[in-house]
Each structure stands twice: as structure tokens, then as C-alpha cells.
């Protein structure tokens, strides 16, 4: 069992959720309540990582973040090492890949809130910020939670992009999914089986938890 | 109106797909799939081209890690010929009765140190500058193939251990999934260099990106590369196997640094 790799994956998942969810709540709510010219294009762009092969993303990340690009060079000057082949690079990649997994359930949740409710709150003199905090966020909470769990579980399972921009560095970019692949390649089926089973269990528990919580919250509001 | 337009677009798209399908020639009778180690990427493509020119037969090449192919062949992968970077894989398949015979040695591979043009590292075969760069901090990231499961990665590790550099460089290694990916990493200027297959460094595309130098072959175990026909191989695969041993193919292989003992590269 490669505990380093497991811990790395859990950290990557947790930090991706932390970095992405506030952004996803803002974008999801914006898309839910506003309609504007070009909205379809923006929504398509957000959904893109769902259908793009991970290799396409991996390729663009290599091009965009490599030390050949101005972005990569600027980052290197600022931080002292390249974004590619580093944990921070994986985090950036992971945030981008997970945008649809976080934004879409959150957007659906905000869309499900009746506009009347917002109008009523405004009529009662509630401030915008108070209305969002006291009415919208609690109602949208199941969607936000689903976004969090999906993002976390999907990060644990991400493989293609990590293989392309990671470089399998222990403690830095060697995630549990990569570690399983390494063990299979080295004909160490026992270790691979152990890690695969653990990953299966974690994913199942995460998804089940999200369903259970969503149901409970749903009942509370019904 | 909108619906009509949509229908038209769908019809056009469908027609386009069918047209593209028709442009692809119908599969010939006997086009075997040949599984080859990643270090053969450029050399074998040229050999296959020469083969097609001479015999008007075609082979489909697929490149990857030898270990992966070893596993896939055991599980009945649709390959008729296997060119491994490590002869042990061929011997193991032979022992399991999956190959026609125990095959033929087709090359003894060499490793090189390569550094991208922008790198502060000087690629010299003695690895003296690598040692200096590790000491003075010029060396941040160094790419090799994963030694846990690739022959070229193992040889790179052996050479680094031979010089006593392994412990110093271990934490700065970036590991390629196979030697091709290691070569991509080593020349990407996200690393300061790497150790890759000579055969890849000799390809025009790669030599544009950096400078390289051969590492003495007595610093590591020999990279004995062996090929074999898989049981059930058809006529074209057998012809390709024979062609691989012809002077014509040997000349191409030698040009890519894939010489046999006794051949000059």
C-alpha cells in the first residue's frame, strides 16, 4: 500500500474542493439567475472538460504551463520552480478539470429556487447578502454538497492528465491512481489490488454519503 | 425553419462521416499488428516503410512499454510479433508457450544523457557536469523512464548508481511512463535534462531539441532487445520478422544506434 500516494490524492482532492467550490457557487448562481447574450457559449465552455479527452487537457496544460510559455516563465520567476511536474501544477489542472463537476450541480440547485422566494425576500426588506446567506445557500446546499463530493471523488480518480503533466514524483505528483498503474506495470498485482479496492471503497462511501445527505436535506425542506 | 436547418446540418455531417469512411481503403487481407518497445518509435517506422516498399505488404505498428505488451500478449492481445526492449519478456512468453520460438536478438540498446538547448546542464557522457550541477544547484529536475517497470529506466538508475549519484538525484527525478515520455520530459525545458534511449536521441525531431552524449555501456547491464513471432502469426508478420534481419533493415537500425554485438553503429 502506497500511503504517500493515498495521502497525496486525498490532499489534492481536498484542496481542489476548497479552491473550486467558492468559485463554483459564484458562477453557478450567476448562471442560474441571469440570462444574457452568449450564455450558451459560457455554459458550453464550462461543460467542456466533461467531453474533452484528458490527453487534450494534458497537452494544453503542458503547452500553457511549461517553461516554454510566458505563463510558465512568470510562475517560475515568482515561485522558483516550474508548475509542470509539481503538486501545484496538479492542483491547477485538477481545478480546471473539475469545473463542470462543481458548477453544474450548483447551478441546477440555484435554478430550482423559485424566483417568487427572492422577490418575497426583497419585498420584506432583506438585504441581498442576507437573502443569499439565509435563503438561497441553505436551499442550494444539496447541490453544493453534490458538487463537493463529485469534485473530490473525481480528483481521486483523475489519471490521464496526471500521467501527462505529473512525472510520477513520490510525495509530489504520484497520486494513488498513478501508483496503481505503476504497480500493475511492475507486475505487482497484490499491491495494485489492495490500492484499487481501497479507492473503490472511498469512492463508494463518498458518493453514498452525498446521496444520503442530499436526501436528508431534501426531506428537511420538503 | 430551425428544425429544417438542423436536419440539413445533421444530413451534411452524416454524409461527411460516410465520405471519410469511404476514403479509408478497405482493410487488406493480412495486416498484422506489431507490438514494439517505445525506443523503436522512429527506427521501426522507417523499417516498416522500407518493408512496404519492398514487399507491398503492410504492418501496423503500436508502440508502448514492453511490460505492458508482455501482459497484453498473455491475455490474448491481437499481436503477431513482439519487439521487446528487454529480452527477458520474450523468454518468459516462450516459457509460457506463447511465441513461435525464443526469437532473435535485434539490438543492444544504449543510453544517452540529453539536455535541452536552454539547459544550464552540459550533456557529457562522463556525467561530470551532471555531478557538478547536482552540487551547485543548477539541477532541479531530471527525467528518466520509470525504473520500477521499464528496461531503459532500470539502466539509467544503474548508471547513476555506478557513479554514486543516485542518492543525490533521487528526489529531483521526473519519471516517464515509458522511455518516449521520458524523452519528451527531458527535452521539454521543464527539466534540465534526462537519460533516454540513444535511438530516440538520434531521431531528427529529438536532436533538434537538445544535445546528447553516450553513456559508457559498462556502467549498466546490457539492454538486450529481443523480438519474437507470436503463435498464430500470419505470412506478413513472418515476412516482416525475416525483413528485420535483412541488411536493409539492419542499416536503418544501426543508423538509430540499435546495433547488434559485432556491428558498428
Image (tube, coloured by chain):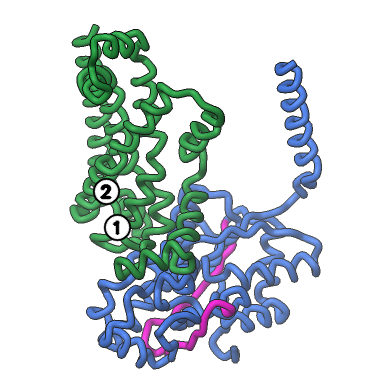
Chain colours: A green, B blue
Residue A186: x, y in percent? 34, 60
Badges 1 and 2: C-beta atoms under 8 Å apart? yes
Residues drawn in magenta = B207-230
| N-term mark: 1 or 2 | 2
Asked if residue A195 can be seen in this view, the reply is: no
Q: Chain of mark 1?
A: A
Residue matched to label 1:
A87
Q: Which mark is residue B262?
A: none
- Horizontal side of B57 relative to A43 (left or right) equals right
Q: Chain of mark 2?
A: A
Classify residue A150 by image quadrant: top left
- Horizontal side of A28 relative to B264 (left or right) equals left
Residue A141: x, y in percent? 25, 23
Quadrant occupied by the C terminus of chain B: bottom right
- Horizontal side of B173 relative to B20 (left or right) equals left
Residue at point 79%, 47% (across, down): B25
Q: Nearer the viewer, residue A58 or B260?
A: A58
Does the segment drawn in magenta span residue B86?
Answer: no
Residue matched to label 2:
A12
Asked if residue B121 can be seen in this view, the reply is: yes
Classify residue A194 by image quadrant: top left
In the rendered image, the vertical position of residue A160 relative to residue B145, given as above or below: above
Amino acid at each position: 500500500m502506497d500511503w504517500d500516494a493515498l495521502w497525496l490524492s486525498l490532499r489534492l482532492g481536498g484542496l481542489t474542493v476548497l479552491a473550486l467550490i467558492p468559485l463554483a457557487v459564484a458562477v453557478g448562481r450567476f448562471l442560474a439567475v441571469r440570462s444574457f447574450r452568449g450564455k450558451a457559449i459560457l455554459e458550453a465552455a464550462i461543460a467542456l472538460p466533461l467531453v474533452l479527452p484528458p490527453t487534450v487537457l494534458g497537452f494544453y496544460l503542458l503547452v500553457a504551463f511549461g517553461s516554454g510559455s510566458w505563463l510558465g516563465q512568470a510562475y517560475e520567476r515568482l515561485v522558483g520552480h516550474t508548475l509542470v511536474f509539481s503538486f501545484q501544477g496538479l492542483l491547477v489542472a485538477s481545478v480546471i478539470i473539475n469545473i463542470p463537476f462543481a458548477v453544474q450541480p450548483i447551478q441546477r440547485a440555484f435554478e430550482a429556487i423559485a424566483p417568487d422566494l427572492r422577490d418575497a425576500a426583497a419585498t420584506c426588506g432583506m438585504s441581498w447578502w442576507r437573502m443569499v446567506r439565509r435563503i438561497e445557500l441553505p436551499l442550494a446546499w444539496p447541490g453544493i454538497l453534490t458538487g463537493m463530493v463529485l469534485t473530490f471523488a473525481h480528483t481521486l480518480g483523475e489519471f490521464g492528465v496526471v500521467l501527462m503533466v505529473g512525472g510520477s514524483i513520490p510525495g509530489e505528483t504520484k497520486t494513488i491512481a498513478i501508483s496503481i498503474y505503476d504497480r500493475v506495470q511492475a507486475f505487482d498485482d497484490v499491491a495494485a489490488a489492495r490500492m484499487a479496492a481501497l479507492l473503490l471503497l472511498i469512492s463508494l462511501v463518498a458518493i453514498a454519503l452525498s446521496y444520503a445527505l442530499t436526501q436528508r436535506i431534501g426531506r428537511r425542506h420538503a | 425553419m430551425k428544425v429544417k436547418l438542423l436536419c440539413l446540418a445533421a444530413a451534411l455531417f452524416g454524409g461527411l462521416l460516410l465520405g471519410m469512411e469511404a476514403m479509408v481503403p478497405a482493410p487488406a487481407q493480412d495486416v498484422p499488428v506489431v507490438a514494439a518497445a517505445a525506443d523503436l518509435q522512429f527506427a521501426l517506422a522507417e523499417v516498416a516503410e522500407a518493408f512496404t516498399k519492398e514487399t507491398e505488404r503492410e504492418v501496423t505498428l503500436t508502440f508502448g512499454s514492453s511490460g505492458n505488451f508482455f501482459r497484453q500478449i498473455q491475455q490474448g492481445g491481437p499481436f503477431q510479433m513482439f519487439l521487446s526492449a528487454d529480452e527477458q519478456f520474450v523468454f518468459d512468453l516462450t516459457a509460457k508457450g506463447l511465441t513461435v520460438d525464443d526469437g532473435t536478438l535485434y539490438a543492444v540498446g544504449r543510453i544517452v544523457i540529453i539536455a535541452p538547448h536552454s539547459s544550464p546542464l552540459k550533456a557529457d557522457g562522463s556525467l561530470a557536469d551532471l555531478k557538478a550541477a547536482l552540487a551547485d544547484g543548477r539541477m532541479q529536475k531530471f527525467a528518466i523512464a520509470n525504473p520500477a517497470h521499464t528496461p531503459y529506466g532500470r539502466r539509467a538508475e544503474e548508471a547513476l548508481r555506478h557513479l554514486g549519484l543516485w542518492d543525490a538525484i533521487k528526489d529531483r527525478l521526473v519519471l516517464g511512463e515509458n522511455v518516449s515520455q521520458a524523452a519528451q520530459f527531458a527535452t521539454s525545458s521543464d527539466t534540465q535534462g534526462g537519460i533516454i534511449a540513444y535511438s530516440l536521441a538520434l531521431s531528427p525531431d529529438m536532436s533538434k531539441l537538445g544535445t546528447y552524449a553516450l553513456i559508457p555501456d559498462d556502467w549498466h547491464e546490457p539492454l538486450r532487445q529481443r523480438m519474437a513471432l507470436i503463435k498464430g502469426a500470419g505470412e506478413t508478420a513472418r515476412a516482416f520478422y525475416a525483413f528485420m534481419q535483412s541488411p536493409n533493415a539492419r542499416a536503418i537500425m544501426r543508423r538509430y544506434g540499435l546495433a547488434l554485438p559485432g556491428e558498428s553503429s
